Structure formats: C-alpha cells, structure tokens
Amino acid sequence: MEMTGKNRKITPIPARGMRDHLPEEVLPRMEVIDKLRSIFESYGFLPLETPAMERIEVLTGKYGDESEKLIFKVMKRGEELLRALEGAKDGIVIDRQTKTLEVSYQSLAQIFSQALPDLGLRYDLTVSLARVVAQYGGKIAQPFKRYQIAPVWRADRPQRGRFREFIQCDVDIVGSDSLLADAEIISLAVEVYRRLNMSAFEVLVNHRGLLKALNSACGNPADRYNDFCTAIDKLDKIGRDGVGEEMAERGLDTSNLKRFWKLAERSCYINEADDLDALLADMNGFIAAGAGGSESIEQLRELFALLRNLGAEENIIRFDPALARGLDYYTGPVFEVVGRDRSIGSLGGGGRYDELVGMFSNRSIPATGTSFGLDRIVEVLIDQNVLAPRRTTLNVEIIDLSGNDMSAAYCGRILKILRREGVSCDLGYGRGKKAGKQMKSADRRNIPFVIIVGEDEVDDALTGVDDQTFSARAGVTVRRLSDGEQRRTDLSATIRWIKESV
Amino acid sequence: MEMTGKNRKITPIPARGMRDHLPEEVLPRMEVIDKLRSIFESYGFLPLETPAMERIEVLTGKYGDESEKLIFKVMKRGEELLRALEGAKDGIVIDRQTKTLEVSYQSLAQIFSQALPDLGLRYDLTVSLARVVAQYGGKIAQPFKRYQIAPVWRADRPQRGRFREFIQCDVDIVGSDSLLADAEIISLAVEVYRRLNMSAFEVLVNHRGLLKALNSACGNPADRYNDFCTAIDKLDKIGRDGVGEEMAERGLDTSNLKRFWKLAERSCYINEADDLDALLADMNGFIAAGAGGSESIEQLRELFALLRNLGAEENIIRFDPALARGLDYYTGPVFEVVGRDRSIGSLGGGGRYDELVGMFSNRSIPATGTSFGLDRIVEVLIDQNVLAPRRTTLNVEIIDLSGNDMSAAYCGRILKILRREGVSCDLGYGRGKKAGKQMKSADRRNIPFVIIVGEDEVDDALTGVDDQTFSARAGVTVRRLSDGEQRRTDLSATIRWIKESV
C-alpha cells in the first residue's frame, strides 16, 4: 500500500447515508444481536448466510420501478465492460473500423444502468431466501425455519433514521401453511421484546382475508382490496376522517365505514375472552356477504388459542381489525408491534406471505415471518434506559507504576493468569506514569477495577513458579473504582473479588 | 413484489465466486466467530464497524494497479450517471444539439471505470481503519485496540479456497510503538489457536529490521531489501536452491547465502534460552555491518521476554530468521502461524506496520496487528475433527401424536415453559404422524431429545394452573435419542434431565 500526498487531501468520511459505528455503539448493538440470535435459536430457527451481492437478474423485476432505482449496482470489470457495450443494441452504433461509438445521449442512462452492471447489492433478505429455497430444494428440509441478520443496501435519500446501509433481522418459516407457524412467529416477536426488556409494547394482529371481506362488506369490488388496505394503513397518521377522505379520493364506497369503525374500536386483547368472542361473532355478521371472510375469522380464533398456549402474557396481543400492514404481498395473518401509547411508532411486524418465496421455484411456497429493525430497537432501548453505550469490555486494567523490565514481566504474568481465569484485562499504556492519572484514565473508560503494581509488589522470587503458586503468593493492590475500596491481597483473592463484583 | 414468469427462468445460483452458507455450515462458523470475539474482548480489543462501501477515492491508489482492478465498483445512479459522462473529458465528444456522443472505443473502459463509479466495496479492513482514525481523531483514545470481523470483496479469479467474498478478522493496536503492543498481538494469536483447540501449530517470529540488515550483510544494496524479502518468502514453496536462483535472477548477491542458511537453520523456540541467546549473538555478528540490525536484535530479545511472561506455552513461539512475510508494508516484528509439520500451510500472521494507518492523517501512526482467516480456520478445525457441521440448535423436539386442538394447546404450554427455562425446543411439524417416523426425523437432524405427547399425556385439568404447578404435574414421555433411554415423568424432572445431558 502507498501513502501518497494525494491521500492526505481525501476527506476521511464514510459514503453518503452510511455510518461508522464506534465501539461504544457497537457493544450495545452486539448485545441486542446476540440476544436475538439466542432467542431465535431457542425456537429452532437456524442461521442462513447469503452473499451481499446477487446477480443483477436475481434482483431486478422484484421491487417495482421506484424501488428498483434504489438498488446499488456493481459494474462489470475489464473486458466484460467493453463486451457489454458492444452487446447493447439500442441507440448505439459501433464502428469497428474507426473504433468509435455513436451513442444517443438520451438512451445512455438506460444503456448504462442495464448493460454495465452484472451484480447488485441485496435490497432485502427475502429475495435471497427465495433464491436459496429454489436452489437447494430437497437439501433444505421444510418447514425451513431460518433467520438471517445482515446488512442490506438502498440508495434512498438519506434522512433522520433512514440510512443507505442498515441491518435487517429476518425470521421466517418456509414451507408450512399451518397456523402454528404463524403463532410461533408472533410468540417469537413477543418473546424478543420481552427479553430485551422493552417496556409498554403490544402486538396488533389481524388477517388479510378478513380485510378482503371487509373491503367487500364496505361495498367495494374485490379488486379494490389493495386500495382499501392502503387507506386503512394510514389510520395512525391521518385519523378516521383522513382515511374516509383517502377512500373517497380513491373512489371507494364510504357509506358503510361507520359500521366498520364501530367494530374496529372494539379492538381487544386476546385474553379478554368474552369481548373477543363477541367481536369476532359480530365481525362475522358484518362481513357475511364477503367471500372467505368467515374462514379468516375461524383462523384468527385458532391462532389466538395457539398464542394463548404459547405463553403470550396478558394484555400483550390485541386483535385489531383496523391493522392493514402496507405491503401488498401478505396473504394471511398479519401483525405489528407498537408502543402501548403509540408514541414510539411501529417497531416491526410481519405476517404470512404465501406467494413470494416460490418466485424462483415455479410454484407457491407458503411462508410466514417477521423482521426486527436493529437501529430502531437499539434507539428505543437506549431511550428507555434499558441499554447504554458501553466504552469497555474490560474488568480490570493493570497499572504498572515502575514501567521497567522487571515489572513488565510481573504484569505480563498477571495479565496471562487473569485472562485464563476469564477476567478480561489489559495493561494500561500509561506505564510509569502516576497512579492517580492512570486510575482516572481507567475510570473515564468505565473499567471497574485497577490492579496497581508498584516496586513493592514485584517479587522476583516468583519468576520460576507455576501459575497456581504464583496466584497464591503474588501480592497485588487492587482497587474498585466505583467506591474507591482498595485491598492489598494475593492474586487468587483478587480474582475472586473481581468475579463477585462484575 | 412480483412473481413473474420471467423469474422462473432465472437460474437460482449465487454470484460467481460467492457462497451461500447453509445453517449446518453457519453454526460452526458462528461458534468460531463468537470465540474470537470473546478472546479479543478479554484482551481489551473493542469492536469497530464500518460500511461495506467506501467512497471510491478512499479505495483507489492504495493497493497497486493489479489489485485495484479487483475492487468491485458501484455505479452512480440516475442523473449523476449522465453528469459523470459529461464531465469526462478525454476521448469523448458531446453534441448537445443532436444529443449524441462520440466516444473513442479504446478509452471507453477507462472512462467507464473512472467516471461512472462513486463507491467501491471494501477490499480490506485496513483502509477503513485508517479512514476512521483520521476522521475521529481525538474522539478515539490511543492506543486504539480495535477488532473488526466483516466481509471484504475482491474480484479475483475464483479457485479452490479463494472466493470473491470472504470474512476478515482483523485485530490491531493503533498508536503505540511499544513492543508490548507487538507482544500482545502475538500472544493473542497463540491464545486464539489454543482456545480453538487447533492442534500442532506454532508461531514463527522475525523482525523486518533484521531482514534489512541481513540483506546488507549478504552484500546487497539497501534498496534491494524488498527483493530479498520476496525471494526468502518463497522458501516454503521452492526450497533453498529455489530461493538462491530467485535471488540470482533478481540480480542479488548470493555469495554469502550459505552463512545465512547456516544461521537460519538454527531457528529455535523462545523458551530454549541458551540456543536462542547464542543464535541472537551469532546473528548480531553476521549482520554487524548492517545498519539498524543490532537494534532489531535487541527488540527481538525484549519481545521474546515479554512473550514468555504473557504466557506463551513452551515450544509454541519460534524465532525464525528466514520468515519474511510477503507484504512490503511491515516495518518491525512480523510473525506467522503455521502447522508444526508445515502441512496445513499458513494460518495467518501479522506484524508491525507503522506507515499505513496514517495515510489519511497527514502523519505516521504506529500500528501492529494480525488477521485471522475464518474460512481457513474452520476448514482446518473440521479436518482436525475439532469442529463439525451442526444441523440443529435444538435440545428437544416435541412430538405431538394426536395433532388435535387439545394436544396443540398442551404442547404449546410445554414449549413455552421449556424455552423460558433455557431449553431450546420446537414442535415437530409432523404432527399426528407415527412416533417412530417423527423420532427418526428428529434423530436425523441430531436433536438429542424428544418429548412424546400422546392422548394419555394431555391433561385437560392443567389448563388453568400456573407454570410452576403445570411443570410439577404435567406428565410427559421423554426419550434420549442417542441411547434410546426413555422416561415417563413430570415436566420439571424432564427439564433437569435434559439440562444435565446436553
């Protein structure tokens, strides 16, 4: 590598919309990820890893035109670049004699974005999952319970809370049409937020089939169902009147909306058995005309029973007939996790999507899943004081007051023994500096203990002994920085004290 | 998303040179990564995360022309693509009237690869580290002990064991010129392989300053030092005679080589104190004329003393005067981890590189570090039978023989209680099928236990009781698949048995 003068003029910042995470941010993020992984695995979900880049044809034609523009495309390299241009027919004339090209200016962007890239950075984890399921077929036993925690990239306009690189945590069950799979996913979501100590959250549940029937019951043709969902989905932002106006603008029938709202406001927790039964029954009456609605209500009834057994706490899971979830690929139960007072917005959600994972497989493959937004979770947990930036992983820093060869040897020996005992420790790099200064430095980095090694401590006679004897005989001064308690004792007792305290 | 007929024609394979990792591979990989993280953190190294993409000017001009071609470049998007082309002056004529371009065919590739990308995928983790150190300056206390475990991308020609996406595990200490830092890195490497239970490895250590002096002692001008190192570095592959021929071809003096080999073959472990002292002394005699050589020998002496105290086991760390390490940015101690019988090749290595991390900072910043190759480590550990593919994270699968609503409720309750107790479990998706078939399926996936719930087990009377009462009263049949031992007992006793066994 080269250190050229040129480098020194480069402003050392990350790419637009992307972030460095310094250690104090990474540590709490990793804490959350480790917890997610362990919960996912305790439910029998297995980790899958796919490459960050997919072949461009795997990515295109999946997300709609607007989203497709947001895919980061990777250029072909070397000879393939030229060959790609030769192959691009429209609006381009290649004169092999004069070795010039004539390119229509207008079609350039199109040519470039279609012919030059051969790879793209993944936009989500679902398309890669669909590719894997198609590729490995029988090698993957279904139902395939997989999770993937990995970055995705979108060339979105960056704004507060929206980045061009962010971690997605996806959990899906592929290949089961059982409601048990939906129940597992929802109960997993509850367990995740519970174990992360997120306070005051609840989970709203509904069914896309019910929404379909509601669309019909409100007097709309079946093919306006997506418009109906899109309008309802805005309830939190624009309120009932707003939703009514939105529907009117979209040419939907609003004459029966009042009856819908009357039912929707009876939204209740699934442990409120009487209210829930009554609501489901009345809902069934309202949608009697709607095709397939009664079946969806039966499914909800069964799902709620499964959820009660899988151990959802009281007053956590709520049947909400007005929950739509914006994305139009859902086909069955859907859910969303929100703050109980709705102040923290949506934390995530999911549902059944039976027509997506089969995209490369030539058939429908039932699937249900959920996605956790790492950034949002970390942000809320820090706001709720459950999680804090962490500046160290150290239990102890060793302060070497002499800084000579003898003390270095002695400190090295202590380091070695502490680490093997599972006590994370480091030698302060201020060797030879004053104790007070070194202790302050350790305290600033939130290291709980220091071991102070002065000339009195270093005992030459211990050089040859084994670790156990060394630990029993080596005298050290150890100080807990939180309360200033200081002890002069042997290394074994020191290790015990530290282990008890941290 | 859309399921078009088009998708069904796409061959569902990953991009060239990139890999999917199915769960049974990911689980042992994650095991290694978790162990690395925990060891790194016990040494006080902190995790850093940087974006996968860097601005293209951050990446270019760092790796040499040949390597630079291997950087995956990301194309500008939308309007910026056109503007980029307008801005490219050489060999391109834009006629704004006719909206055509005339582009010289030959310069196309150059224009495209220079003007069209604005981002690149990182080629290693060091350039990003240098950028971060320059960017955050005072916000990062030095010495900065950081680790980063993350993928890098290189458009290399794929071949056995070489992929276009692979994980690098880098550990570096930035901002310390102390030999203690070098000793920490080497002792960390020893600890990592030791704790991973890698068998029969050793660590070769040398000093770039000594190699410089050896180059001079062999009669070569100082500026031929890189050639000298490159030739020596091939020793393992081409043997002594080959190295001699290589040197001759490069116009180096080979008349003193015999004396060098005579010293080099006295390579010894650093705990063989007498041999080591004698070798260092004789080495000092040989290079007496070489500038700075004696200083390097002094540094090695100090480094070896530090390493002995930091707890390197006997016969692990070896002084090897013929270790060169190919990369020319090393400036001090260098090391390499190899199999003791040299059969597994290099596992990794590192050293001091004081002139690299400062590339964006306008000054030299001392640094020393190492890199662990995840793929190689996993491969060797699997070969050594230390690590095995793992097909499950489950301790138990619950087999529901009835598959009706009642048993579903009962099984759900058991699932919930087991998971809260830290026992990972899942409900078999073969509900209602025969016990033997379901047990075979669980065994195939290496799940150690099954809990069998038949009609006899389901006890309706337990519906209302709390979890503790349920655990004490609920009768289950539990079977350990490894030896077929089967017990009919309550859930609490079952949990104890499983926890004891796994």
Image (cartoon, coloured by chain):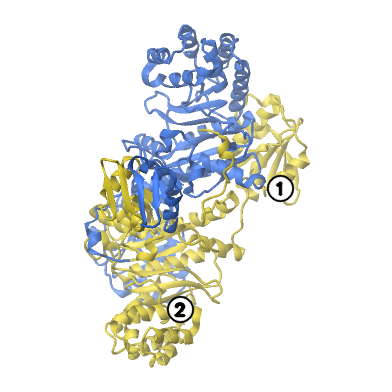
Chain colours: A yellow, B blue
Q: Which residue is mark 2?
A: A234
Q: Label 1 marks which chain's residue?
A: A
**Distance CA(mark 1)–CA(mark 2):** 49 Å
Tell me the amino acid under the disc marked 1: Asp
Give the residue displayed 28% in from the left and 89% down from the top: A289
Is the residue A372 above or below the residue A462 in the image? below
**Residue at the front extreme of this rendering:** B97
Q: Which residue is mark 1?
A: A443
Residue B445: image location, x then y, percent? 30, 52
Q: Is residue A174 left or right of residue B28?
A: left
Q: Is residue B225 left or right of residue B29?
A: right
Is the residue A414 above or below the residue B228 in the image? below
* Near-viewer residue (A427 or A68): A68
Give the residue displayed 26% in from the left and 42% down from the top: A96
- Residue B446 in view, yes or no: no
Residue B9: image location, x then y, percent? 22, 57
- Residue A279 in view, yes or no: yes
User: Could you say which disc has been placed on residue A114 in the image?
Assistant: none
Q: Quadrant of the N terminus of chain B?
A: bottom left
Give whichever of discs 1 and 2 has the lower sequence position: 2
* Near-viewer residue (B55 or B210): B55
Quadrant hosting residue A283:
bottom left
Residue A163: image location, x then y, percent? 50, 59
Give the residue displayed 31% in from the left and 40% down from the top: A79
Tell me the amino acid under the disc marked 2: Lys
* Near-viewer residue (B260 or A396): B260
Q: Secondary structure at mark 2?
A: loop
